[in-house]
Image (spheres, rainbow, N blue to C red):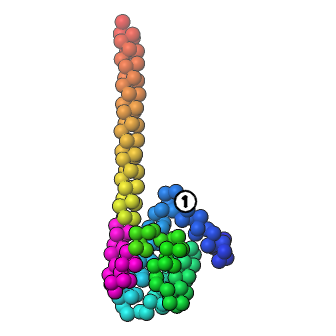
Amino acid sequence: MNKHPKGRYLFDRMLLSLPIVGMLLRKIAVARFTRTLGTLITSGVPILEALSVTARTSGNAVLEDALMKVRKAIEEGRTIVDPLKESGVFPNMVTQMIGVGEATGAMDAMLQKIADFYEDDVDAATKAGHDRRARVHGWRHRYLALHASILVDRQAGRLDRSLAGRTQ
């Protein structure tokens, strides 16, 4: 499915729409997009070329398509914010912050701040998942240990009664 552009696009769209995983994948994509674009702009790469590179390296067909539409809109003289909003791919906070960065001439710094925020958010979300698994594992371990001790205790009680019956 991933070898065909339409199939890849549909697959990536489906992934982004999944309840928990989709939200995490979207955050990862936003972090990667803003980090890459911010780094390219800081390095002096023109915005149109930077958007092309960022789109091609996004790793997600939905994001790639949205960024290429943004690039085309900028070529036509529009600002970056409107086509980002129209894509429906990027959260409102991201488009608003990019708009502020564009208006103040500090878009590269704003993109880096957005990337920092989303990378921290992804780290926190994945750490929380790891902590939850660790808590469940710990709970499961204590539960099994308790049951094992109860079974051993019952067996010891049976053994005691059995031995007591033999001595009488």
Query: How far across and how far down the image is residue 120, in percent?
Result: 34, 67
Residue at image point 54% right, 77% down: 66
- Identify the element where label 1 is drawn: loop
Q: Which residue is mark 1?
A: 18
Is residue 74 found left or right of 116 in the rendered image? right
Front residue (pair 136, 106): 106
Per the image, is 75 magenta? Answer: no
Q: Residues within 10 Å of mark 1 (few under 14, many from 20)?
A: few
Q: Is residue 17 above or below residue 51?
A: above
Residue 36: quarter of image: bottom left
Q: Quadrant of the N terminus?
A: bottom right
Answer whether residue 60 is visible to the viewer in this image.
no
Residue at image point 49% right, 86% down: 78
Front residue (pair 149, 43): 43
Q: Which residues are magenta?
A: 97-120
Main secondary-structure element of the magenta-colored stretch: helix
Query: How far across and how far down the image is residue 84, in percent?
Result: 49, 76
- Give the residue furthest to the top: 168
Front residue (pair 152, 22): 22
Q: Is residue 4 above or below residue 18?
A: below
Residue 94: quarter of image: bottom left
Per the image, is 114 magenta? Answer: yes
Query: How far across and how far down the image is residue 86, in percent?
Result: 53, 74
Residue 64: quarter of image: bottom right
Residue at image point 36% right, 45% down: 138
What amino acid does circle 1 point to? Leu
Q: Quadrant of the C terminus?
A: top left
Query: How far across and how far down the image is residue 41, in percent?
Result: 39, 88
